[in-house]
Amino acid sequence: MLQIALPNKGALASDTVELIQAAGYKCRRSGRELRIRDTDNQALFYFLRPRDIATYVSNGVLDLGIIGRDFLNEQQAGLEEILSLGFGTARLCYAGPRDRNLTPDQFDGLRIATSFSHLVSADLKKRKIQAEIVPLDGAVEVSIQLGVADIIADLVQTGRTLEDAGLSVIGEPILHTEAVLTGRTGTVEAKSAAGLFVRRIQGILLARTYVMIEYGCPRSSLERVCEITPGIESPTIAPLSKPDWIAVKALAKREEANQIMDDLERLGATGIVITDIRTCRI
């Protein structure tokens, strides 16, 4: 049976369950269950603290896990990033008092509070900076006010928490993070159920990226409309009962859909319909 670790709380938890359910697996908890068995798909989902997931997967207790790239890289558990999942995006950044106007080159001798000691140490080493790391677990913004640290390194999404604390980002991000599917090297190839899980998740991610565009147009416009909607390999083209008209169907990037509709209309296309895709495999 395939065993997968999921975050039991935090920013990734609800989006993770939504993604896996969309892929056809049963993993929603009714309460505070630690595990959910999906008998139909021969899968067992464990709900664990995000910081513990890499440990269980790297030790071979569980097959796959979903965690943030920040935790994956911080824990150095020897796991591979199998898929990036497109949610839970954030930046690991340095931040300090807004009125100090610091740059990372000025960190020598300063105290840096963070929950990501390994990533920060590696970044400081790369910069050849000698600074003291103050390990903390969450809510590091207050460490400056309490005199424990001079600056912090923490995850930033909107930046509102920093702003409320009178802090601002310093320099470029140390890491861009998001939710990722992780596992030991070779797990997907060695275990067919793991490979199927990955393909299903890929199908949902592709469906979130693309839409299906369908329309009719004069045959004389075919070459030009195909340049606008080339599809993945090529569009599907079929004749219509109306002489010299054809029907065209193609996948297109979701973010480009409205512009594509405008361009097709200018070329004389009609009956333009854009629909969401539930899942797909390419």
Image (cartoon, rainbow, N blue to C red):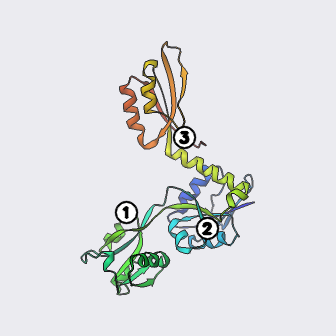
Question: Considering only order in the chain, which callout, 1 or 2, is on the residue closer to the N terminus?
Answer: 2
Residue 141 visible somewhere in the drawing: no
User: What separation in Å lies between label 2 and label 3 (alpha carbons)?
Assistant: 32 Å
Residue 258 visible somewhere in the drawing: yes
Which quadrant of the view contains residue 161? bottom left
What residue is drawn where x is 69% and y is 67%?
62
Determine which of the numbered discs, if any, sits on residue 79 in the image: 2
Q: Secondary structure at mark 2?
A: loop
Q: Check the image and name the residue furthest to the top.
A: 243
Residue type of the residue flagged with mark 3? Ile
State the residue in front, 180 or 106: 106
Q: Residue 257's x, y, as percent? A: 42, 38
Residue type of the residue flagged with mark 2? Leu
Q: Can you identify the residue that label 1 sits on? A: 158
Classify 10 Å Cα crowding around label 1: few (below 14), some (14-19), many (20 and above).
few
Q: Secondary structure at mark 1?
A: loop
Question: Considering only order in the chain, which callout, 3 or 1, is on the residue closer to the N terminus?
Answer: 1
What residue is drawn where x is 56% and y is 70%?
50
The C terminus - image quarter: top right
Q: Residue 105's x, y, as percent? A: 32, 77
What residue is drawn where x is 63% and y is 49%?
200
Depth check, mark 2 against mark 3: the one in front is: 2
Q: In the rendered image of this protein, does residue 111 appear above or below residue 248?
A: below
Q: Can you identify the residue that label 3 sits on? A: 277
Q: In the rendered image of this protein, does residue 197 appear above or below residue 211?
A: below
Classify 10 Å Cα crowding around label 3: few (below 14), some (14-19), many (20 and above).
some
Q: Secondary structure at mark 3?
A: loop
Q: Residue 84's x, y, as percent? A: 53, 57
Q: Is mark 2 in CB contact (under 8 Å) with mark 3? A: no
Which quadrant of the view contains residue 123? bottom left
Q: Residue 187's x, y, as percent? A: 69, 61
